[in-house]
Image (cartoon, helix red, strand yellow):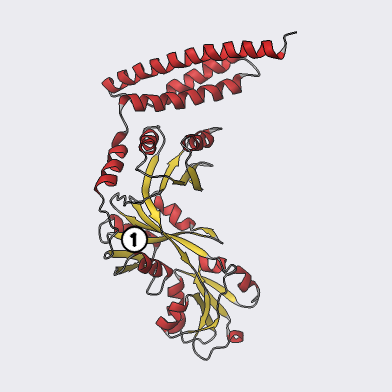
Amino acid sequence: MSSLEELRKEMDAVNSGMMDLFKKRMEVSAAIAACKQQSGAPVYDPARERTILAAVSEQAGEGLEDYARVLFQTLFDLSRSYQVSKSGRGGALTAAVEAARDNTPALFPQRALVACQGVEGAYSQLACDKLFAAPSIMYSKTFDGVFQMVQKGFCRFGILPIENSSYGSVTAVYDLMKNHNFHIVRSLRLHVDHCLLVKPGTKPEDVREICSHSQAIGQCAGFLATLPNVKVTACENTAEAARMVAQSPRTDIAAIASHNCASLYGLVSVKDHIQDRENNYTRFICISRDLEIYPGANRMSMMFTLPHSPGSLYRMIAKFAALGLNITKLESRPIAGRDFEFMFYLDVEASAQQPEVVKLLGELEVSGEYFNFLGNYSEV
């Protein structure tokens, strides 16, 4: 029986042989990249990869076929990356990112025409006022309207809530992302403090119905649970709820909204700080039609699809881990019409000033799956 030392020497010899073969394989990959570039063939060839995987699985035999597939899938990823770097084909995205990085003005605009969902007093408007010194605001009833106003050029920017620290993602916004062309140029964390607003003279015990946006209702679930006999009605926006209460002839209706709405619509707060958590923040994104990367941008967002196969998400995440990039959010939403398949949304701490990051974006663009770079921006 061989000793551990002898087995390790044998393993070292195997590793050395594998390294020689690996270098040879990458040399052939570079030659293939040159041929593909000359013929215009895509880097990613899924049919070819499937053929190889079937062959190596059979060659590995029972007990090792799964390990062989993982090994060769990793080799495919490395080969595609190497082919992109050798061919210089980062695609249109690489050029667009570099142009935006180099040509975007040094200062974020202080005056702009901005689209917000809701009406005056909405939290989106408060976020807008935090981002811009003197914005001109156009309101939309829906989140989709904000996307449309920016995409069609009616407004240069749009403000949208994307997630809340206590109630999670604003799924309606995520579901709309795949339907529109836009880029994120800034994000903001806004402290959200909800109040129960009523008409002057209405007492808390008089309230029989409370109106607000579904996110605000969720953020105040604990408070609402203490009011079992009160009807809770979801509406388009917290500020819209406040305006509706102010205009209603009823005196038994209330709204969950901000203190700012109380002064705007002539209401009074009968209960402050009704959110479940004092540390309640909503994250807003500022979108534009054009890709703009302002100095100091240190966060990237993207959305993509993956093959409906084991390990595909792991291999995607590994690409970021290999560069030491910290993923701060990973969200998935079902793809309509495709059972149990998902669109992924990813935030990562990264900058277009890093050449290796721009190179990675180029690789992801030509990976064969759907990939959309949403922007490189800073959060304030």
**Relative to 366, does residue 123 appear above or below in the rendering?**
below
Q: Which residue is labeled 1 in the image?
A: 158
Most distant residue in the right direction: 1
Amino acid at pointer 1: Gly
Most distant residue in the front direction: 5
Whole-percent x, y for residue 18 in the image: 52, 14
**Relative to 295, does residue 241 appear above or below in the rendering?**
below
Image-based side of 1 in relation to 156, left or right: right
Write the residue at 25% across / 57% down. Answer: 153
Q: Secondary structure at mark 1?
A: strand
Write the residue at 32% across / 66% down. Answer: 132
Whole-percent x, y for residue 135 in the image: 29, 68
**Relative to 62, does residue 359 appear above or below in the rendering?**
below
Write the residue at 54% across / 35% down. Answer: 314
Which picture quadrant has residue 286?
A: bottom left
Image-based side of 197 in relation to 300, left or right: right
**Relative to 332, does residue 79 appear above or below in the rendering?**
above
Whether residue 45 is visible: no
Residue nearer the viewer, 152 or 103:
103
Write the residue at 47% across / 44% down. Answer: 344
- Label 1 crowd bin: few (<14), some (14–19), many (20+), radius 10 Å: many
Whole-percent x, y for residue 108 in the image: 30, 58
Quadrant the C terminus occupies: bottom left
Whether residue 34 is visible: yes
Whole-percent x, y for residue 237 in the image: 44, 70
Number of residue marks: 1
Which picture quadrant has residue 44?
A: top left
Quadrant the N terminus occupies: top right
Most distant residue in the top direction: 1
Residue nearer the viewer, 343 or 356:
356
